[in-house]
Image (cartoon, rainbow, N blue to C red):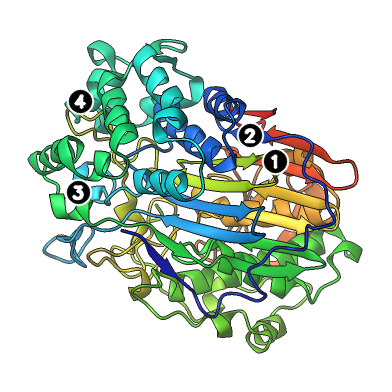
Amino acid sequence: MIIRILVLGVLLIGINACDTSARKFPGNAAVASADPLATAAGMEVLALGGNAFDAAVAVAGALGVVEPAASGLGGGGFFLLYLAKTDEYRFVDAREVAPAAATRNMFLDDDGKPRKRASMDGPLAAGIPGEPAGLAYLSENFGTLPLSVTLAPAIRYAEEGFNISPRALLGLRFRKKSLLDSPAFATVFYPAGELPTEGDLIIQPDLANTYKRFAESGNDGFYKGETARLLVDGVRDAGGIWSLEDLATYAVVEREPTVFEYNGMRVVSAPPPSSGGVALAQMFKFLSAYPLDSLPVAQQVHYEIEAMRLAYRDRAVYMGDPDFVAMPLDRLLGEDYLQVHRQKVVSNQALASSSLEGIDTDGSEGRQTTHFSVLDKAGNRVSATITVNTWYGAGFIAPGTGVVLNNEMDDFSIKKGVPNEFGLIGDEANSIAAAKRPLSSMSPSFLESDRGIAIVGTPGGSRIITMVLQAALAWERGADAEEMVSQKRFHHQYLPDVVNYEPGAIDVADIELLQAMGHKLSESRRPFGNMNVVTWDYATNKVSSVTDPRGEGEGRVY
């Protein structure tokens, strides 16, 4: 079952892309992903004559095997597409949904307080997966090759094994205690109950069989039949609330992308239930009133922080699943509203988050997603961000499936003002309800101008949106793909009222100036994100594919 929805009030211009009739096709195809084996899978399918959408299925399928900490058949995501032949954008929402038995206060105790890690660990934390439906939809509606071909690399990697990487081991070490609670998970990833060592071979026969059923029967091969039965039995035996009907009735939704312009650059991004596209549009429109390039660096950073503060406040108050809540998007993106906020912002003083009417926090402050970018020789594009939420999702595998389940229920607001794992707060707009999609920060995007196009996105939880903002600002100023993924990053999300920054993102003198304005700054102990970018330069017809130096990925040009 497929649903197609127009999200009114988000689009600032029409959904057709810039006129490409006078442009030649890109000189090459390209894939950039978080793992070399996944990139190789995309290359393999392109070599077989597949298009960008076939390659996207292959990359996503492979990532679910070789990067299980970040995505897989037990998760969901967003696929932003450009169809060169018809010159149009499409957006496939394959976000997870709450099970039918989910309730508003399911993670609260009798006193109304959040139960510790109830929305994080175990099958109760898992929403109904959307990624398999998304891959089947891409294959059936946009691809040229069957799933039996595009998923062949994933099946091979699961059967023959892959060498576990330092990044994957980090997650296994970090969550060992909770992950060992799932016997099927422990059997695969903790041989003899112990943490594997770097380079050890991880073989996943049950996952290979799940992929085979999916490749043979498409949507029904996952959401019905043996796989569905194994999933539901395993979830319910371990205290979860899934049903066979939950799986059988899951449907992807096509929505209109969020499209806007900034200084001659067109940005195409994700609509709700992602908050990314709307937040990006709001931040760019807010910043458009300031001559950023002519200002001192500290002043630029100051205004960018204030743009972030507003966007994340509005995210917390207003954003949610558009099928369940009405969002005042026209007002939030309107010049009158933005001008009112600009009038509160002065050039030499931080605007305290507490001065904005928003949501009071209740409780203490509380990464794992993946992104890939694809371009084919015909000019088709895919920007895809897929996830199981945090490291290894719910830390649970239903016996016999090999599928690592998500913990996306934590992306709902389990109680007003209570931060989720990424410190994000929310209100009723993002409260739990049966069949509802949780709000997301995933922001797969296209950047377009007279110089060319960039296909961009990143994991990073609540920091995704601000990382895409900074990459887009860099590209608009002339940066190449290497510079976009390598630049140091900073982030503010309304609450907590702190600017986090990577070492080197802001120099010492500018830190002192920002502190004098009243900004609270904190240097991060961990790097931000794992961005993967493909660019096409119109003047030279050069295609570049670059992955983040913070990660273990690979960009290749075919």
Give the left or right position of residue 88, taking residue 182 as reference.
right
Residue type, mark 3 in image: Leu
Whole-percent x, y for residue 220 in the image: 25, 44
Question: For the point 53% across and 68% down, which residue is it?
Answer: 256
Disc nearest the viewer among 1 and 4: 1
Residue 249 shows which numbered tag?
none
Indicate whether 329 appears above or below 456.
below
Picture quadrant of residue 281:
bottom right
**Would residue 529 be visible to someone looking at this image?**
no
Residue type marked 1 = Val
The residue identified by callout 2 is: 31
Residue 102: x and y in percent read 18, 61
Alpha-carbon neighbours of circle 4 within 10 Å: few (<14), some, or many (≥20)? Answer: many
Look at discs 3 and 2 and give the one toward the viewer: 2
Instruction: Name the element at disc 4.
Output: helix
| Badge 1 or badge 4: first in the primary sequence | 4
